[in-house]
Image (cartoon, rainbow, N blue to C red):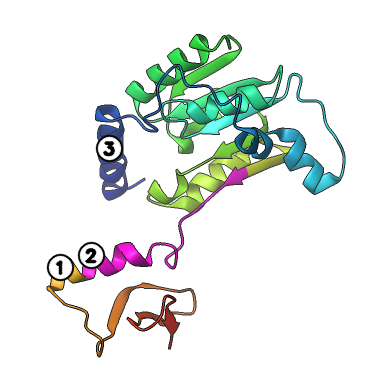
Amino acid sequence: MNFDQSLILEKIRQQFDSSPYPRIPLEQSPKDNAYQLYIHNLVTAFYRRDRQVIDTTDRLILDAGCGSGYKSLILAEANPNAKIIGVDISSESVKLAEQRLKYHGFDNAEFHCLSIEDLSDLGYQFDYINCDETLYLMPDPAIALAAMKAVLKPDGIIRANLHSALQRLSFYRAQQRCSRGITVGAKYYLRFREPRLLDDRPIVLSPYRNSPHLF
């Protein structure tokens, strides 16, 4: 990891130390959230891939970038008798995650202040890795994915997400307008130099339509 990447991670750590995320009350339980329990249940993921129902007992689950531990709690509720391991670079977030799981009666959980790139230091091989809202913060998501794959069992599953350029067009549009002082009228287009899609065509947003055009 070079100096710039280390600096980025340090800024991210400082941000989440000062304001752990997600900001969900400690006592809030996901027990009644059927959708979240369904998508974070190992049975769902393994059945969709293998068409077999598995037992979650003694399964080892990693919550990579666990934050304040709400997703870790969902994983614990959704997977009876599984062991939950959470990692995050924010020590304050890790403290909250530990408190949250203990508050809800889950003693079979561990939390570590650790970067995803250093997962091998834990000495575990995981059945399932959950990585929500984290990869896009990494200086190099490919390195983070490789680190997770290295601690995944051969038949394990990684569940992760990224934010696409198209998904965030409204944010880019606001940034462009603020930085350039451009007012969008009925006769104008905004042409963005960044971001670009994989084929390197610029994204162009038209005020006449709700979707971007690719030229």
Task: Give yes or no for contact between labels 3 and 2 (Cβ–Cβ under 8 Å).
Answer: no
Q: Are marks 2 and 1 in contact (CB under 8 Å)?
A: yes
Q: Is residue 168 magenta?
A: yes
- The image position of residue 135, as x and y in percent, is 46, 47
Residue 131, position as x, y percentages in the image: 53, 40
Foreground mark, 3 or 2? 2
In this rendered view, identify the residue nearer to me: 182 or 155.
182
Mark before the other along the chain sequence, 3 or 2:
3
Identify the residue position indicated by label 1 in the image: 179
Residues drawn in magenta: 159-176
Quarter of the view holding residue 76: top right
**Quadrant where the image shows the N terminus:** top left
**Quarter the C terminus occupies:** bottom left
Residue 67 located left or right of residue 56: left
Residue at image coords 83%, 31%: 54
Give 185 or 145, whichever is nearer the viewer: 185
- On screen, residue 50 above or below 66: below
Q: Residue at x 51, y 25 (%)?
A: 86
- N-terminal label among 3 and 1: 3
Image depth: mark 3 or mark 1 in front = 1
Name which residue type carries label 1.
Ser
Q: Which residue is mark 3?
A: 10
**SS label for mark 1:** helix
| Numbered disc 3: secondary structure | helix
Residue 28's disc number: none
The amino acid type of the residue labelled 2 equals: Gln
Q: How far, Cα to Cα, is label 3 from label 2?
A: 24 Å
Residue at 39% across, 19% down: 96
Disc 2 designates what residue?
175
